[in-house]
């Protein structure tokens, strides 16, 4: 019996170290008002949806050993809002995305709907799941790549035009927009 209890406790500990549907169950038990919302999904911690990828909120939870209360006052995505405030607003605490991996950038010329997950995971895109193809390390301000975190002091317009146009041209894909109306809707 003693060995069974030890084995079960080890299995439980290992389960907590890896994302499973039971972690979503724990999350909803802590925040029942999020049931059936867009946050009632793996994407709350895993954005982009790429194997072994955790966003900053997921990393904070892992570091706190899944202590949800311990990370409530943090600002995981550095958008000046506490995680708990974002949860109360049903917004992603680890991402600036409006929907899982879907960003809407407003612009006078027309909004840009950007599907980040498709750019990351779809084989037809040049990134091929490698973040470094488009993003620089969070603390390194390279001049030719997007930062992994938003910086309101950097114009997305100039960065987007320079980086997106380059990649769209290099891709050689007929589906990659190279005219204004292809991105601005």
Image (cartoon, grey):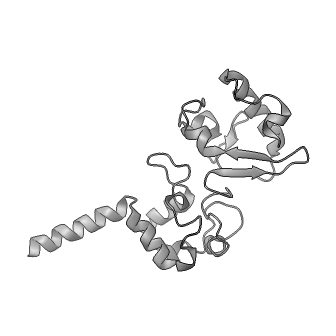
> What residue is drawn where x is 71% and y is 28%?
168
Q: Is residue 70 above or below residue 121?
A: below
Q: Is residue 98 left or right of 18 when viewed as pictured?
A: right
Q: Is residue 108 left or right of 95 when viewed as pictured?
A: right
**Can you say which quadrant of the picture contains the C terminus?**
top right
Q: Position of residue 142 (x, y in %)?
A: 69, 37
Tag count in the figure? 0
Q: Position of residue 152 (x, y in %)?
A: 79, 53
- Closest to the observer: 120 or 36? 36
Q: Position of residue 123 (x, y in %)?
A: 54, 31
Residue 150 seen by the camera: no
Q: Is residue 35 left or right of 139 when viewed as pictured?
A: left
Q: Position of residue 97 (x, y in %)?
A: 67, 56
Q: Is residue 1 above or below residue 48?
A: below
Residue 99 seen by the camera: yes
**Can you say which quadrant of the picture contains the N terminus?**
bottom left
- Closest to the observer: 113 or 83? 113
């Amino acid at each position: 019996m003693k060995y069974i209890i030890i084995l079960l406790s080890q299995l439980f500990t290992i389960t907590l170290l890896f994302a499973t549907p039971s972690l979503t169950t724990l999350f909803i038990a802590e925040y029942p008002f999020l049931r059936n919302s867009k946050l009632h999904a793996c994407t709350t911690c895993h954005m982009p949806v790429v194997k072994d990828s955790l966003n900053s909120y997921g990393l904070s939870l892992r570091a706190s050993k899944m202590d949800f209360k311990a990370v409530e006052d943090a600002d995981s995505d550095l958008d000046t809002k506490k995680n708990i405030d974002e949860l109360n607003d049903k917004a992603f605490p680890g991402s600036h995305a409006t929907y899982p991996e879907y960003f809407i950038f407003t612009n006078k010329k027309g909004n840009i709907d950007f599907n980040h997950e498709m750019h990351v995971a779809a084989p037809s895109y040049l990134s091929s799941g490698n973040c470094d193809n488009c993003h620089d390390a969070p603390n390194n301000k390279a001049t030719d790549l997007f930062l992994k975190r938003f910086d309101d002091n950097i114009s997305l317009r100039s960065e987007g035009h320079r980086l997106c146009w380059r990649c769209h041209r290099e891709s050689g894909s007929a589906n990659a927009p190279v005219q204004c109306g292809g991105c601005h809707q």
